[in-house]
Amino acid sequence: MTGRMIDMTIVGGGLAGGLAALAVHRAHPELRLALFEAGETLGGNHRWSWFASDLDTLGKDLLEQFRKVEWNDGYEVAFPAHSRRLGSSYRSLASHDFDAALRRALPANTIRTRSRVAELLPDGITLESGEHIPARVVVDCRDFLPTPHLRGGWQIFMGRLLRTPEAHAVPRPIVMDADVRQHDAYRFVYTLPLGAHDLFIEDTYYADRPLLDRNALSGRIDRYCERRGWQGEIVGGETGILPVITGGDFAAYRRSLGPPGVVRTGARGGFTHPLTSYTLPFAVANALALAREARLPGEQVAAIFERRARRHWAAMRFYRRLGRMLFDAAAPAERYRVFERFYRLREPLVERFYAGNPTLGDKLRILSGRPPVPVPAAIRALLGKGSPLVHERS
């Protein structure tokens, strides 16, 4: 590929990069694309889930390419003082199905795994091997990196895929079971019945520090499964640490990513839900936007996405404020009360909240009534800066 100009190079074969490649190819099959991923497979080892209401018709059409698990009978949440079943349809996509679908849909030689990129410039990329690939448009879709420019906390999780010898009889997803010991963080367990004998169980924490203790989390999943009466063979799993962004200097963060002229999207570009760390709805929207602009010169596409990033940052301000109250106004063991109160609100509001599209009325309703955190602490949290999103040195 050295020396041959291509139309678009996409760096990072995760959710944002894979969907971008698919959307551009579907809209412009004549364009020459290249998708570079440092790992061995696209998507790594992950599971992405979302509510059907998170996506519009075009977004749902883009995801039709992928084999996924669908639940149309609602989902459940549980807290110490409140439990509820909601009616929203839910979806989940595993990374191995993501990888398989993209390999079927994209032209031969588009995907290059085990290809780590050393340098991204507006006119091309250079791999660690020294190979240079000129490109009209360069798109950076790599994962988020810790940064002193942004502030907040962390979402830490360990997931386990359990295969039970007998049918487990879990009828629908349990998206949030916070009726568990909190362990100095907002803790909940997330369970997906992927099949009659397959359960995906994930232990999740909204924590101040980005520390993942595998032994401790594995033991807690063991005890949770014992309590629920679930037994079986562990056939897979995942772990992760995601940012929960509560503030910072977004312009400085974007400048720190590299030279102008490169299209920056995905989690590294700042396109996440600040409070839930969801990325799928934004990855879908950005993939479709990239497809609409794919014929433009790279610098013009980069400028369009710079504006999209700034608009997204502004639109997510409400969530960042909620995040500051969660991390800086509530004692760690009491943080669950914020979500417990939220899940008493009307279901359409809950749907819009997760999709990142709350109305003014939704915001007023969320903030009205008796607050789940002390008012003086909430005021201090809103006036404070929060902690930088950097990993601690051991």
Image (cartoon, rainbow, N blue to C red):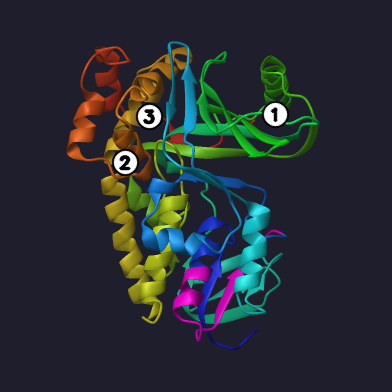
Q: Which residue is mark 1?
A: 168
Q: Secondary structure at mark 3?
A: loop
The three-letter code of the residue at mark 2 reads Arg
Is 17 positioned to the left or the right of 375 in the image?
right
Q: Magenta residues, as a range?
A: 22-39
Front position in the image: 99 or 241: 99
Q: Is residue 71 left or right of residue 306?
A: right
Quadrant of residue 323 within the rendered picture: top left
Q: Which residue is mark 3?
A: 386
Q: Of label 2 and label 1, which has the lower sequence position?
A: 1
Packing grade of label 3 (10 A; few <14, some 14-19, many >=20) is many
Residue located beneath label 2 in the image: 352
The percent coordinates of residue 291 (x first, y second) are 41, 72
Residue 270 at x, y percent in the picture: 41, 51
Query: Is disc 2 surrounded by few (<14), some (14 to 19) or many (20+) residues within 10 Å?
Result: some
Q: CA distance from mark 2 to mark 1?
A: 32 Å
1 or 3: mark nearer the eye: 1
Report the front residue among 277 and 328. 277
- 176 within the magenta span: no
Residue type beneath disc 1 = His
- For image coordinates 47% across by 64% down, the residue present is 62
Residue 229 at x, y percent in the picture: 71, 18
